[in-house]
Image (cartoon, rainbow, N blue to C red):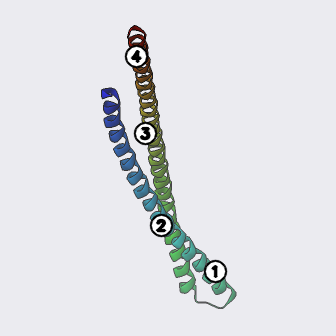
Amino acid sequence: MAETMALSKILHVREQEKNDAHKAYRNSMELFEKIATKLYTLLRKKEAAEESYESYLQQTTPIDQLKEQVRYIEILNKQIVTLQHSVQQARREMETKQEKLTSAHVEVKKFEKIIELRQKEQAEIILKQEKQSMDEISIQQFLSRKNG
């Protein structure tokens, strides 16, 4: 019984590690979504800027306005490249956290299974001892009736 108590303490520690890993994963996922949303918004801005530039080309537009639009698109491109790196890094971080969460979950399940098996073994031992005691009592009652 003391063995299962020690295992239960270890299980509690593993569950805490799993909960911490889950929080870390959730935080990394939120960060990834935040950065990915920024990237999506920036891509939409670039798309709108390029459409605007195309429409300027179809019309008679001052060259300064075209240059300004090209500069704006270049700035957006630089920001997009930077954000793409951030998204990749956030994705890697999220995947790492997910692997840690999965590993922690597996560890918890292992200890739960070990505890379950040990408790089952303990219950079987107790049941066997009870049967032996009942057999001994039955034998003694039989012998006492026979002798009496």
Q: Is residue 44 above or below residue 140?
A: below
Residue identifier under label 2: 79
Q: Residue 6 in the image: state x and y as whole percent.
A: 31, 31
Question: Which kind of residue does numbered mark 1 sit on?
Answer: Glu
From the viewer's perspective, is 43 left or right of 142? right
Q: CA distance from mark 3 to mark 4?
A: 49 Å
Looking at numbered disc 2 in the image, what kind of residue is underneath it?
Gln
Relative to 32, is 138 above or below?
above
Q: Residue under circle 4?
A: 141
Name the residue beneath numbered marker 3: 108
Circle 1 residue: 51
Q: Secondary structure at mark 2?
A: helix
Q: Which mark is residue 77?
A: none
**Residue at coordinates 55% horizontally, 80% vertically from top-left?**
69
For image coordinates 42% across by 34% down, the residue present is: 111
Quarter occupied by the C terminus: top left
The answer to which of 43 and 122 lies nearer the viewer is: 122
**Disc 4 on helix, strand or loop?**
helix
Q: Secondary structure at mark 3?
A: helix
Kindly identify the amino acid type of the residue bearing the numbered disc 4.
Answer: Gln
CA–CA distance between discs 4 and 2?
91 Å
At a point 31% along the width and 36% down the height, the residue shown is 9
Label 2, label 1: how many angstroms apart (C-alpha)? 18 Å
Q: Earlier in the sequence, mark 3 or mark 2?
A: 2
